[in-house]
Image (cartoon, helix red, strand yellow):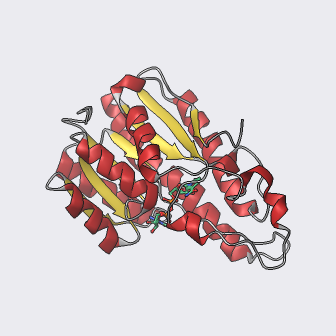
Amino acid sequence: MEQRYVGKAAVVTGAASGIGRAVAQRLGAEGAKVACLDVNAESAMETAAGIGDNAIGLACDVSDWATVESTIASITEQFGQIDVLCNVAGIGGFAESHLIDPGVYARMIAINLTGTFLMCRAVLPQMVERGHGVIVNTASTAGIMGQPWSAGYCSSKAGVVGLTKALATEYDTPIRINAVSPGGVVTNMYAAFMPPEGVDWNRMRKMSRDNVETAQPEELAGLFAYLGSDEARYITGSIMVMDGGITA
Ligand SMILES: NC(=O)c1ccc[n+]([C@@H]2O[C@H](COP(=O)([O-])OP(=O)(O)OC[C@H]3O[C@@H](n4cnc5c(N)ncnc54)[C@H](O)[C@@H]3O)[C@@H](O)[C@H]2O)c1
C-alpha cells in the first residue's frame, strides 16, 4: 500500500458503512489520521477501531449545522488541522414523484446536498487560512442523468455536482474540490433500492441493476484516495465518473 497520507489528517462522513467505510479504511491504511463520522455512531466507532490508533469514530448528523461545526472544531483540536474532507454520507430511496411525502424529499436534499455543503462550510475556513486542503464529494450517475422515482435523489446529486464546481471556481489550487460519481456499488444502500410497487422497472433503462456491472466500495475508495492525494495536484472542479459506462 502506498503511503500518500503520512502526516495528513482526514475526515470521512458516512464512515459507518459502504463506500465511506472503505474510504476511511483506505486513507488510514495510507497513513492518514482519520475521523470517521456518521449518524450511526456505534458503527463509525467500529470502522475507526478496525483502522487502529490513528482513527477516531464520532457521531455526526451532517444535516445539522451546530453538530457539524462543533464536530469539526473538536477534530481540529485533536488532529491539529484537517487536510482532506471526504463527504460520502447520503441516503437513497425510490418514490413516485406525484406521491412522495414532501418531508421525505426535503430530508434527501438536507442530507445529500445541504449536508455536503455544511461540511465544506465547516472545514473551508482553515483551508483558506492555510492556503491548502482537499475536498472530495460524492455525486452519482443520478446527478448526471435522469433516473425515475428519484426526483429528490437526482436533485440532490445534481446539486452536489453544481456545488463542487462552484467551490472549485471560488478557491484556487492548492485548495481543490472534486467529486466522485459512482454507478452501482455493492453496499447497504444499493441492496435496499426497491422500486415503488407496480411501476415499470424498464424505465430504469441503463441504470438497472440487471443491466449494469457493479463495483465494490474498495474500488471507489481507490479513486477517493487518489483525488485526495498530491498526485491529483492539478485536478479541481472535476466530476470523476466510475460507473462502468452507465453515463458514457
Ligand atoms: N451504492 C451505490 O450504488 C451508490 C451509487 C452512487 C452514489 N452513491 C453515494 O455514495 C454515498 C455512500 O453510499 P453507500 O452506498 O456507501 O451507502 P450506505 O448506506 O452503505 O452508507 C451511507 C452512510 O451514510 C450515513 N448517513 C446517512 N445519513 C447521514 C447523516 N445525516 N449524517 C451522517 N451520516 C449519514 C449512513 O448511516 C451510512 O453509514 C452516498 O452519498 C450515496 O448517495 C452510492
Q: Residue at x 79, y 61 (%)?
A: 148
Outermost residue on the top side: it is 234
Q: Measured from the top left, where is residue 128 in percent x and y? A: 38, 33
Instruction: Say which quarter of the image contains residue 198.
Output: bottom right
Quarter occupied by residue 194:
bottom right
How many circles with numbers are drawn on the protein?
Answer: 0
The reply to whether residue 247 is in sight is: yes
Q: Looking at the picture, does residue 24 appear above or below residue 189?
A: above
Q: Give the residue at x 40% y 33%.
A: 226
Q: Position of residue 28 (x, y in %)?
A: 25, 47
**Observer-nearest of 226 and 76:** 226
- Furthest residue in direction left, as rendered: 53
Quadrant in which residue 239 is drawn: top right
Tell me residue 154's x, y (percent). 71, 55
Q: Residue at x 50, y 64 (%)?
A: 63
Residue at coordinates 60% horizontally, 34% vertically from top-left? 165
Residue 100, position as x, y percentages in the image: 77, 75
Q: Is residue 77 left or right of residue 60?
A: left
Residue 69 vs residue 186: left or right?
Answer: left
Q: Is residue 235 above or below residue 34?
A: above
Give 149 or 72, whichever is nearer the viewer. Answer: 149
Work out which quarter of the rendered image holds the N terminus and state it.
top left
Answer above or below: position of 81 versus 201: above
Name the one closer to the observer, 200 or 125. 200
**Is residue 31 shown above or below 67?**
above
Image quarter (top left, top right, bottom left or bottom right) of the C terminus: top right
Instruction: Looking at the picture, tell me which residue is in the foreground, 214 or 176.
Output: 214
Query: Is residue 174 at least partly visible in the picture?
Result: no
